[in-house]
Amino acid sequence: MRLCHENNIRIICGKSDIFETDWEAILSTGGYSICKIESCLILNDCVEMQILRNRESSSYIILSGCLSCFNESVKEMCSLIDYISNVVNKDFKIDVLGNIYELNENISSVIYDAYREKHSAFKHTFGNIKLRVPPSRFYKDYKKMKNPFHKIISIFRKG
């Protein structure tokens, strides 16, 4: 697989069998806790993993983490990238915000640098909040956390 340009649009070209791989089974045997929601796998309660196929039948994996648990998400993504590279035993490229990196580069530093401004803006908006959730659940869990009625119910449940 490789990156190609078609009509000034960057696309993934080539064939890959990652789409046909049973990632749920492979990752669960690798020690990851997995929850499946539609076409997305939630790994260790903070990273979402989607496997997509484009028109040219090329497959690729998208990893997403939440800024509310930024450090944990980056750590989980890097661990996952290492694990996947060992499973597929192939060279692959990593795309972070449109920039391509080799597997042997320090991906955690790349991710921290690429998302530094977004993480700062997140902290400015939400404060120094720590919620270990996947990105798709952040707003729902954040609203629950801020709801005073929910806090009262949580106190009664703990007691």
Image (spheres, rainbow, N blue to C red):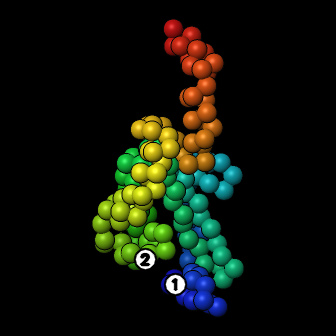
Q: Amino acid at mark 1?
A: Leu
Residue at 37 percent of width and 48 percent of height:
71
Relative vertical location of residue 63 with respect to residue 9 in this rendering, above or below: above
Q: Amino acid at mark 2?
A: Ile
- Would you say 111 lies left or right of 57 here? left
User: Crowding near pointer 2: few (<14 within 10 Å), some, many (20+)?
Assistant: few
Residue 114, position in %: x, y?
Answer: 40, 64
Q: Secondary structure at mark 1?
A: strand
Residue 32, position in %: x, y?
Answer: 46, 47
User: Is residue 157 visible from the viewing direction of this image?
Assistant: no
Residue at 62 percent of width and 68 percent of height:
52
Which label sits on residue 100? Answer: 2
Number of callouts: 2
Which of the two discs, 1 and 2, labels the residue nearer the N terminus?
1
Q: Nearer the viewer, residue 10 or 37?
A: 10
Q: Nearer the viewer, residue 80 or 94?
A: 94
Residue at 46 percent of width and 51 percent of height:
121
Residue at 31 percent of width and 71 percent of height:
105
The residue that mark 1 highlights is: 3
C-alpha distance separating marks 1 and 2: 9 Å
Question: Do tag 1 and tag 2 residues touch (Cβ < 8 Å)?
Answer: yes
Q: Quadrant of residue 102?
A: bottom left
Q: Nearer the viewer, residue 148 or 9?
A: 148
Q: Nearer the viewer, residue 26 or 137?
A: 137
Q: Secondary structure at mark 2?
A: strand
Furthest residue toward front? 124
Residue 39, position in %: x, y?
Answer: 66, 56
